[in-house]
Image (tube, helix red, strand yellow):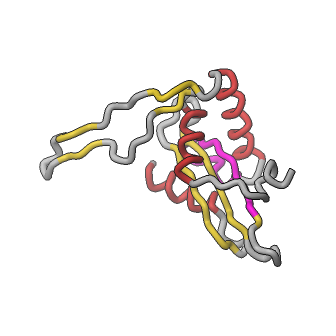
Amino acid sequence: MMTAMGQGETQVSPYHMALITSAIANGGKLMKPYLVDKVTNASGAVMKETDQKEYKQLMTAEEAARIKEYMKSVVDYGTASVLSGQSYIAAGKTGTAEYSSDKEKDHSWFIGMSNVEDPELVVSVIIEASDGTAKAVNVAKEIFDSYY
């Protein structure tokens, strides 16, 4: 039961969470991950560009759409409301993972996407050993704000 709530031995990286979030954004399609989109020279000409390839269907399009609705509700009515009312439409999920025995520190998580109807940016943020004042959703907001 503790693992199901994210309090046990479940171990996942922010990169893995970004992959899952991008599958939700892409209608359930998990794309082959890559770190470099393109390489340009000093004058801006594209020297090399990564081909985007589908790896597999992780979930149905209907399941992905339902999860996006839930993630949008977290922004509209829940713990990620700092992202509501911006120039972009965001959807996401916050999370807190307790890790210390004294329960004074935790890991703050946020995964999300911008422009929900036609997503263009996915973020995955973790702030480790937070005292409760540092929130991953605030870092995500800074990323979205900088992008737009």
Q: Which quadrant of the figure has residue 107?
A: bottom right
Q: Which quadrant of the figure has residue 135?
A: bottom right
Q: Which quadrant of the figure has residue 59?
A: top right
Q: Nearer the viewer, residue 90 or 3?
A: 3
Residue 127 against residue 144 in the figure, above or below: below
Magenta-colored stretch includes residue 81: yes
Which residue does the image show at 45% across and 55% down from the upper left?
A: 146
Residue 113 against residue 58 in the figure, above or below: below
Where residue 106 appears, x then y in whole percent?
73, 69
Q: Is residue 141 left or right of residue 79?
A: left
Q: Nearer the viewer, residue 23 or 32?
A: 32
Q: Is residue 105 left or right of residue 47?
A: right
Residue 109 against residue 48 in the figure, above or below: below
In the displayed orientation, state which residue is furthest to the left.
Answer: 43
Range covered by the magenta-colored residues:
80-97
Q: Nearer the viewer, residue 52 or 93?
A: 52
Where residue 148 appears, x then y in whole percent?
45, 48
Which residue does the image show at 66% across and 34% down from the upper left?
A: 68
